[in-house]
Image (cartoon, rainbow, N blue to C red):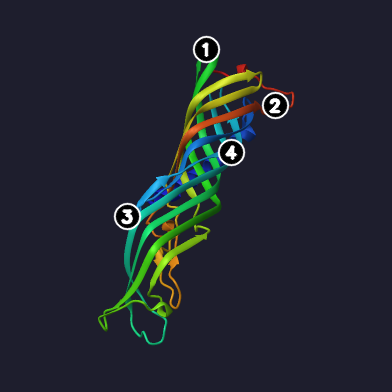
Amino acid sequence: MKSLIYKMRRVFFLTILLLAAHMLTAQNFYHEVSVGGGFGLSTLRYDFSQGSRDNGLGGYVGLGYSYNFHYNWAMVTGLEFEFSGASASSDGIDYTYSITPTYPQAGYDFLYRTRGENFEETHRVVYMNIPLMLRGRYEIGEHFLYGAAGLRLGLPISSSHSGSIRNAVTTGYSEYSQQVHSNEPENGFSTYATLNSSGNLDLKAYLSLALEVGAEWSVTQGCKLYSGLYFNYGFTNISADTKQPLLGYQSGTMPKLNSVTAVVDKVRIMSFGVTLRFAMDYEWFFGNAKQEAEFER
């Protein structure tokens, strides 16, 4: 899978280079610039084995550029800012893992058991996206139907999470002494009415499949309106490589409540919604338009 993703990234950047080379040599083309956005489902997808995940709403805004090299065909790119989110919850969690306590009298490893109730977390992320898509259209009367497909590269800009858990209980079991340690807050084993957490998420860049279908409407000469549906599905895992437990052991103090995105194996971006974009012929805007009629159909 990693080799496939690596090859797709190479294709992404190679296509940009080929597009640039074609622009330097082609004669029959025109440029189009646009501004627009979309709204709908825009969420983080992951499998939380001890709870549930709810999708979040979001969308994107950005600037677009299309290189129209044929009457019905264009290469599309741009710069977008995507807003996504999700939430996770659980009536009860129960994790056990091995730890090495740092207080002097421990001397051996423990099995650290963590339990809690009413776990909740929300997370919000912002990505800067660079799409690269091939767009085609089909003429129907005075309007067009269009479809576009390609890839979208996403770079993390900001992220945050906020979570809480109630009635958290932590105990340590020593296989050496076969004793259970509890009610020892000075050693990190105790009961806590509420634990809260907030902070940034450790997320990576992603590559996604990008699809769009809709209608193209002529507003005035040189100006168009695109309306339709868009769909993006991330191929790559954006969560950190180093995993952490939901309740992390801290000797001498309360446990650390981590984000569920650091616990699950994989986190992916997915979005689906409606899009609206206003576009202008670049040459028309500066009074030197190249008409679409000049192109061979």
The residue indicated by pointer 4 is 61
Work out whether mark 4 precedes mark 3 in sequence or the reverse, and give the earlier one: 3
Q: Earlier in the sequence, mark 4 or mark 2?
A: 4
Taking the spot 36% from the left edge, 84% from the top edge, the residue there is 106
The CA span between labels 2 and 1 is 25 Å
Label 4, secondary structure: give it. Answer: strand
* Element type at mark 3: loop
- According to the image, label 3 marks what residue? 49
Residue to which mark 2 is pinned: 283
Q: Assess disc 4: are there few (<14), some (14-19) or many (≥20) residues with their C-alpha within 10 Å of its C-alpha.
A: some
Q: Which residue is rendered at x = 50% and y = 45% of the image?
A: 84
| Amino acid type, label 1 | Gly
Q: Position of residue 295 (x, y in %)?
A: 59, 19
Q: Are marks 4 and 1 in contact (CB under 8 Å)?
A: no
In percent of width and height, residue 69 lies at 58, 27
Mark 2: which amino acid? Glu
Q: Give the spatial CA distance, label 4 vs label 3.
A: 34 Å
Discs 3/2, front: 3
Residue at image position (33%, 75%) is 172
Residue at the extreme bottom: 105
The image shows residue 192, relative to residue 123, as above or below, that is: below
User: Does dot 1 land on a helix, a strand or a loop?
Assistant: loop
Amino acid type at circle 3 is Ser
- Identify the mark nearer the N-term, 3 or 2: 3
Q: Position of residue 33 (x, y in %)?
A: 64, 31
N-term mark: 2 or 1:
1
| Location of residue 13 with respect to 275 vertically, above or below | below
- Distance (Cα) linking label 4 and label 1: 30 Å
**In this rendering, the label closer to the viewer, 4 or 3:** 3
